[in-house]
Image (cartoon, rainbow, N blue to C red):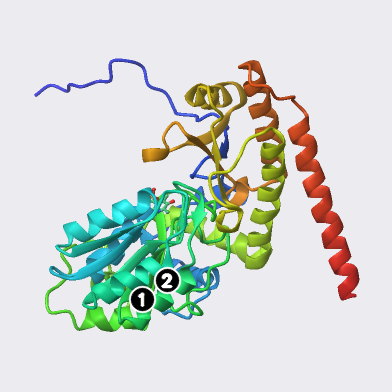
Amino acid sequence: MTIQHLPPKKITSFYPPQRTLMGPGPSEIAPRVLAAMSLPCIGYLDPVFVDMMDELKMLLRYAFQTDNALTFPASGPGSVGMEMCFVNMVDPGDKVIICRNGVFGGRMIENVLRCGGIPVIIEDTWGEPVDPQKLEDTLKQHPDTKVVAFVHAETSTGCMSDAKTLVEIAHRHGALTIVDAVTQLGGAPLFVDEWNIDAIYSGSQKCLSCTPGLSPVSFSQRIIDRIKSRQKPSQSWFMDLDLVLGYWGTTSRTYHHTAPINGLFALHESLVLLREEGLENAWARHTRHYLALKAGLEAMGLSYLVKEEYRLPQLNAVRVPDGVDEARVRKTLLTEFNLEIGAGLGPLAGKIWRFGLMGYSAKSENVMLCLSALGSVLMDMGYPIKVGIAEAAAHQAYAEQHAQAAKNIKQVS
Ligand SMILES: *Cc1c(COP(=O)(O)O)cnc(C)c1O
């Protein structure tokens, strides 16, 4: 036998360029998190590692605001967290209500179908929140519904739904809930226990600003009871919570699959950063930078897709002005300014840009770079804006917030 398939070109080490990431995720990774990831690997049953796993679970309980014992990072991207919820909670023939107001609700429908469940779909316009009245009405029409699933923070549209109310309605009709908090976690208020959420999943690469490929999940006792009383095992071996519990549970640490060790070092560090900053301060930081970005974008003459009260601070969906080649703008921002922003998806393709302010990317340097780069590119393309007014408006928004904060401190003391 001869060795074949030598690469037809000389391939050397890969060094990615340094980008400013202001898209829908991944977000930029803090230097401390990157450093943690490059530490030497250790075994997944090393007692030192097992201690760190316990800390990870504590830190995730803080991030999710829950006592749930079964709170851990699933090995895989947010999509694995999503699938883990569905394969463990939906059996063939189960009726599941999916509230769809963007891309990710659509993926939930796919999951239900692959589990052999019967999806009942509630549609809301992309850019609007899930309508609680529609959920109430649909549950009345389908009293045998087992599960209600919805996306808390729709990254495809920048819209937040009222998770607390939706969960409350589902429970009143005897259904369990699956909540997608991939973009919500760490970016805006989320209270898993106070809101009685049954199953929730998130992602490491959005507002936690960690390496992509991990999915923090949390399951209430109601879900554990349901899994324990299951007649047939889950159709997925890898995501079967009963098996995963053997490694991440409270009583045992037996091999299921090799944990993504260095990724978990990184997640631990990103959660330590969150703990140091404080959850409420992290939420406030996302809002602060959103307000500055908003002031700048609006000064430029751009408008938001979502009504102010439903807007995600961490994901700003903004209408592309008529006659502007939106793809060319994004390409120019990337090649000339090393700045990544997101495009619209599905029915919003070509109609919006998505500016992410997630985690470590939510900082004033990024807001100012984005406004100045976007302003220059639009002006260069002939759009009637003046460079400089957006930055000044953003700066004024920061100044007003500082003044307000100073006033609040005075009132307290
Ligand atoms: C990004 C995202 C996902 C998917 O996460 P991946 O890590 O890309 O698999 C799911 N839901 C929402 C709301 C998201 O923003």
Q: Position of residue 384 (x, y in %)?
A: 68, 22
Residue visible at 36% across and 76% down? Answer: 170
Q: Residues within 10 Å of mark 1 (few under 14, many from 20)?
A: many
Taking 387 as reference, is 260 left or right?
Answer: left
Q: Which mark is residue 290?
A: none
Q: Is residue 157 above or below residue 232?
A: above
Q: Position of residue 10 (x, y in %)?
A: 36, 17
> Across the whole image, how many numbered discs are drawn on residues?
2
Residue visible at 15% across and 72% down? Answer: 233
Residue type, mark 2 in image: Leu
Marks 1,2: beta carbons within 8 A: yes
The quadrant the N terminus occupies is top left
Taking 89 as reference, is 265 left or right?
Answer: right
Q: Which mark is residue 170?
A: 1
* Residue 231 position by quadrant: bottom left
Depth check, front residue: 150 or 115: 150
Residue visible at 79% across and 48% down? Answer: 398
User: Could you say whether the residue bearing mark 2 is in a helix, strand or loop?
Assistant: helix
| Some atom of ligand 1 lies within 8 Å of the CB belonging to the residue at label 2 | no
Q: Residues within 10 Å of mark 2 (few under 14, many from 20)?
A: many
In this view of the protein, can residue 288 be seen by the observer?
yes
Depth check, front residue: 25 or 250: 25
Depth check, front residue: 152 or 13: 152
Depth check, front residue: 244 or 321: 321
Residue type, mark 1 in image: Ala
- Please give the residue where the numbered disc 2 appears in the rendered image: 166
